[in-house]
Image: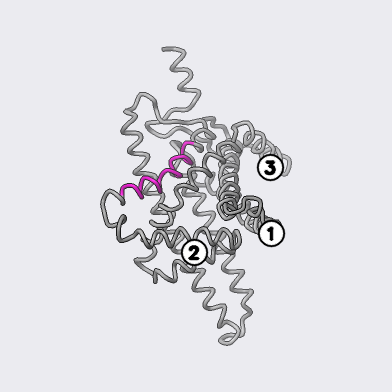
């Protein structure tokens, strides 16, 4: 991956950075990768939700966790999406005594939950032009990726747990804020929005920093994570208005709730990949660049090795 000395900053330079981000986004085929990522994420949802419920249920009331998740999803993508997630949760609860109790089923859940993150890792590698060294043992690479992806799943679950706990607490306080301290509930809603933005930025930072087979400075990750979180936050409003005003799920009949969830997952995937492109451009122009980590190679290095034999 390219490295360069930090360049001058200014409005013109930043606009060039944004334009370069957009061009590379389409040049790398990110819309197609986002579609593939959405597909894998959608079919990993049952496993992800089951593991999330299991983790959160250890420290919070399981019933409250389920209601909070459905409420959060409903606020994001409407009742149709919330109904779909509620159905997934109900199925997970019914299956818990039969499947989750067995080691084989736990392994299947872990594999399913990490599939989306493994696909995301492939997409980020492609965007940043790095990949595992093909001379390494490919079975070992596959297993290491799965274990590492599972670690990312646990990290994401923990961050979501913190976000959910804070949101629930602020929601409860908001109902009593006016009575207790005379503070308007809108103040707590603003605090909740700021915390949600911070958690989103932290999630993006974790994925950009640890998922790809690349080394990148934290300060460069920070810029990309904040930009991605901003797009994600704005998108929550825009997509929410779109889904609430047009109800695109109606065109799909009985599969309408599935379509709504897919639309949201696809948008989120697009934001994530656009953020990765922005992070790369920022690192090249203003930061320390992006380099392959140990055990990985850049596309340029691999092409040179193949040509020279």
- Mark 1 vs 2: CB contact within 8 A: no
Mark 1, other Cα within 10 Å: few <14 / some 14–19 / many ≥20: some
The residue singled out by tag 2 in the image is 69
Residue at the spot 49% in from the left edge and 46% down from the top edge? 41
Mark 2, other Cα within 10 Å: few <14 / some 14–19 / many ≥20: some
Mark 3 and mark 2 lie on one chain; the one further toward the N terminus is 3
Residue at the spot 54% in from the left edge and 30% down from the top edge? 2
Mark 2, secondary structure of its residue = helix
Mark 1 and mark 2 lie on one chain; the one further toward the N terminus is 2
The residue singled out by tag 1 in the image is 241
Q: Nearer the viewer, residue 288 or 43?
A: 43
Asked whether the viewer can see residue 19, the reply is: yes
Asked if residue 12 lies left or right of residue 4, the reply is right
The residue singled out by tag 3 in the image is 14
Mark 3 and mark 1 lie on one chain; the one further toward the N terminus is 3
Mark 3, other Cα within 10 Å: few <14 / some 14–19 / many ≥20: some
Residue 167 image point, x, y percent: 51, 69
Residue 267 image point, x, y percent: 60, 48
Mark 3, secondary structure of its residue = helix
Q: What stretch is highlighted in magenta?
A: 107-122
Asked if residue 20 lies left or right of residue 157, the reply is right
Query: Which of the two discs, 3 and 1, sits closer to the camera?
Result: 1
């Amino acid at each position: 991956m390219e490295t360069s000395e930090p360049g001058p900053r200014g409005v013109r330079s930043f606009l060039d950075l944004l334009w370069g981000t957009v061009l590379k986004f389409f040049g790398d085929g990110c819309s197609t990768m986002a579609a593939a990522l959405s597909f894998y994420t959608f079919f990993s949802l049952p496993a992800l939700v089951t593991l999330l419920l299991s983790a959160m249920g250890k420290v919070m009331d399981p019933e409250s966790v389920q209601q909070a998740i459905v409420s959060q999803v409903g606020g994001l993508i409407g009742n149709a999406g919330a109904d779909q997630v509620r159905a997934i949760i109900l199925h997970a609860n019914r299956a818990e005594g039969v499947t989750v109790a067995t080691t084989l089923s736990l392994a299947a859940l872990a594999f399913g939950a990490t599939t989306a993150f493994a696909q995301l890792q492939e997409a980020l590698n492609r965007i940043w032009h790095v990949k595992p060294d093909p001379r390494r043992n490919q079975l070992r690479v596959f297993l290491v990726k799965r274990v590492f992806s599972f670690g990312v799943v646990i990290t994401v679950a923990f961050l979501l747990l913190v976000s959910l706990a804070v949101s629930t607490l602020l929601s409860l306080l908001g109902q009593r804020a006016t009575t207790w301290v005379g503070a308007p509930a809108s103040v707590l809603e603003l605090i909740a929005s700021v915390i949600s933005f911070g958690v989103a930025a932290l999630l993006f930072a974790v994925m950009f920093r640890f998922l790809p087979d690349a080394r990148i400075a934290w300060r460069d990750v920070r810029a990309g994570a904040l930009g991605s979180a901003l797009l994600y936050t704005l998108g929550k409003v825009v997509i929410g208005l779109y889904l609430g005003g047009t109800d695109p799920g109606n065109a799909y009949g009985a599969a309408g709730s599935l379509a709504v969830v897919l639309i949201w997952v696809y948008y989120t995937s697009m934001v994530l990949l656009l953020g990765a492109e922005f992070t790369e451009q920022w690192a090249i122009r203003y930061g320390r660049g992006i380099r392959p980590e140990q055990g990985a190679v850049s596309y340029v290095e691999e092409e040179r090795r193949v040509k020279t034999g």
